[in-house]
């Protein structure tokens, strides 16, 4: 009795499936993070609203892409992912500074490594939480990596291609 050979999947089909999974992970994470920020009332002033605005923008853009599969929508989405990374980086700095100032007020003797270590400890504000924005920026960027919707036509001869997300 011989085993039947495993079915070889088309690499284009496999990449489309992986791309779809990446988008599901990105969307679930961004919607969850956005809901958490709203539940925490992370809405005071521009800097607290910035991550929410970037999330709204990116979800609208990905819906735009899903509706029309336009190359420009993918490029705008890539730009939004850069905004995710910038927002996360700004958030890390702002959270760290705010927590460090609080630690210095509560214990003026803290300095150097001890101040750094104490700043990273504890929950309020969570110093490393904004790094999630950076992570989602990279995950969204991974969705667009070598995306067929970004391919530039180099030939006038058309060949059948699979539709991918």
Image (spheres, rainbow, N blue to C red):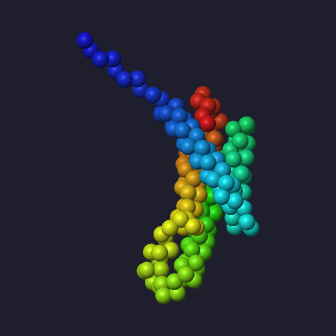
Spot occupied by residue 3 in the image (x, y as percentages of width and height) = 29, 17
Q: Farthest front residue?
A: 106
**Camera sees residue 33:** yes
Comparing 79 with 24, the one in front is 24
Residue at 59 percent across and 58 percent down: it is 133
Q: Could you tell whether 73 is left or right of 27 in the image?
A: right
Spot occupied by residue 123 in the image (x, y as percentages of width and height) = 53, 65
- Quarter of the C terminus within the rendering: top right
Residue at 58 percent across and 62 percent down: it is 130
Q: Relative to 25, is 118 above or below? A: below
Residue at 63 percent across and 63 percent down: it is 87
- Quarter of the N terminus within the rendering: top left
Comparing 136 with 104, the one in front is 104
Spot occupied by residue 49 in the image (x, y as percentages of width and height) = 71, 62
Comparing 23 with 93, the one in front is 93
Q: Could you tell whether 125 is left or right of 115 in the image?
A: right
Q: Farthest bottom residue?
A: 109
Spot occupied by residue 16 in the image (x, y as percentages of width and height) = 55, 35
How many discs mark residues in the rendered view?
A: 0
Q: Relative to 118, is 19 above or below? A: above
Q: Quadrant of residue 19?
A: top right
**Camera sees residue 141:** no
Q: Farthest top residue?
A: 1
Residue at 60 percent across and 44 percent down: it is 28
């Amino acid at each position: 009795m011989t085993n039947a050979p495993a079915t070889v999947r088309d690499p284009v089909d496999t990449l489309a499936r992986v791309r779809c999974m990446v988008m599901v992970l990105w969307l679930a994470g961004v919607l969850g993070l956005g809901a958490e920020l709203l539940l925490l009332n992370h809405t005071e002033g521009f800097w607290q609203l910035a991550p929410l605005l970037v999330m709204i923008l990116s979800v609208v853009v990905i819906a735009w892409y899903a509706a029309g599969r336009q190359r420009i929508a993918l490029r705008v989405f890539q730009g939004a992912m850069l905004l995710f990374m910038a927002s996360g980086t700004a958030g890390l700095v702002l959270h760290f500074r705010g927590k460090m100032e609080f630690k210095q007020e509560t214990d003026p003797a803290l300095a150097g490594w001890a101040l750094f270590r104490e700043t990273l400890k504890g929950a309020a504000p969570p110093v490393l939480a904004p790094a999630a924005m950076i992570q989602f920026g990279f995950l969204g960027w991974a969705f667009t990596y070598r995306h067929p919707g970004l391919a530039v036509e180099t030939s006038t001869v058309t060949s059948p291609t699979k539709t991918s997300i």
